[in-house]
Amino acid sequence: MGNRKTSPLSTLFLVLIFTILYLPIFFLVFYSFNSGGTMYDFEGFTLDWYKELFADTRLLIIVLNTLLIALLSALISTVIGVMGAIAIYSFKNRKTKNTLLSLNNVLIVSPDVIIGASFLILFTMAGIKLGMFSVLLSHIAFCVPIVVLMVLPKLLEMSPTLIDAAHDLGASRWDVMRKVVLPYITPGIFAGFFMALTYSLDDFAVTFFVTGNGFTTLSVEIYSLARRGIALNINALSTLLFLFTIVLVIVYYFITVRNKPTGMGVRR
């Protein structure tokens, strides 16, 4: 199949879309180095806002809390999501499988405000104190369906003959899972983990409902700071988060390229 030539109009449209998406971010990054202290007139280059950011012990603790919640929720939801995807895949009844998929998808498309309010009511009724534990449970809950959606397509791509061949060679169910299924769906597992990590880092609405006194995450803290007035240390923090996100994307890209299956054999 020959290469299709991209029309100038399509190229212009793509450039326009990326400009609209990235221009506010670059604007924010640019003014994080402004010595004037405002986002109106750039008076000179400075790193004072980054120094002020790293001197703020409370904000650094919030950063660590956010990263801890994101890593734990991504790890736990990946384990649960992989098991859930395998369970859905194992169902032979198409109606049952579609019902479970629909229930999974409802959690993804539901508004965050409704999910957050629901968790707040649930934790209040259950007597669970709002704080780190409630935030962690909430993040795990909304990350699991994302992992399922990332892993399930890889399971559906896998030929059933691979599993049949492994059983014919005398492999146990655990051997089939460990040596055939998991290696095949590894790209989907990594994709689910990084998606869950990103969703957890970005979440505001759900976290806003379930966080308590003495514990908060970056999204809620940035919202609180922005309500008091725009300070350029917020720009500095946002710039570092943007760079961290880019690093995550690059790492995910290299991991998926490295784990891209070139062929699949059955090992006894």
Image (tube, rainbow, N blue to C red):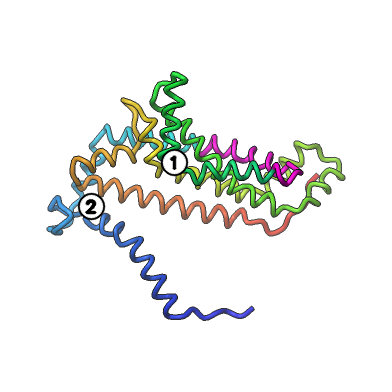
Q: State which quadrant residue 3 falls in.
A: bottom right
Q: Is residue 201 magenta?
A: no
- From which residue to which does the magenta span run? 74-96
Q: Is residue 141 above or below residue 194?
A: above
The earlier-in-sequence mark between 1 and 2 is 2
* Pick the front one: 140 or 206: 206
Secondary structure under the numbered disc 2 in the rendered image: loop
The kind of secondary structure the magenta stretch mainly shows is: helix
Q: How far across and how far down the image is residue 155, in percent?
A: 68, 49
Q: Residue furthest top?
A: 127
The residue under label 2 is which amino acid type? Ser
* Pick the front one: 196 or 13: 13
Q: What's the distance in space between the residues labelled 1 and 2, CA to CA?
A: 25 Å
In the picture, measured across the screen, residue 197 lies left or right of residue 211, that is right
Give the quarter of the figure containing the N terminus.
Answer: bottom right
Residue at 39% across, 25% down = 130
Secondary structure under the numbered disc 1 in the rendered image: helix
Q: Which residue is mark 1?
A: 200
Residue at 69% across, 44% down = 97
Q: How far across and how far down the image is residue 113, in percent?
A: 40, 39
The residue under label 1 is which amino acid type? Ser
* Pick the front one: 163 or 7: 7
Q: State which quadrant residue 209 falls in.
A: top left
Q: How far across and how far down the image is residue 65, in percent?
A: 38, 33
Residue at 65% across, 51% down = 154
Q: How far across and how far down the image is residue 252, in percent?
A: 51, 52
Q: Which residue is mark 2?
A: 32
How many marks the image carries: the answer is 2
Give the quarter of the figure containing the C terminus.
Answer: top right
Mark 1 vs 2: CB contact within 8 A: no
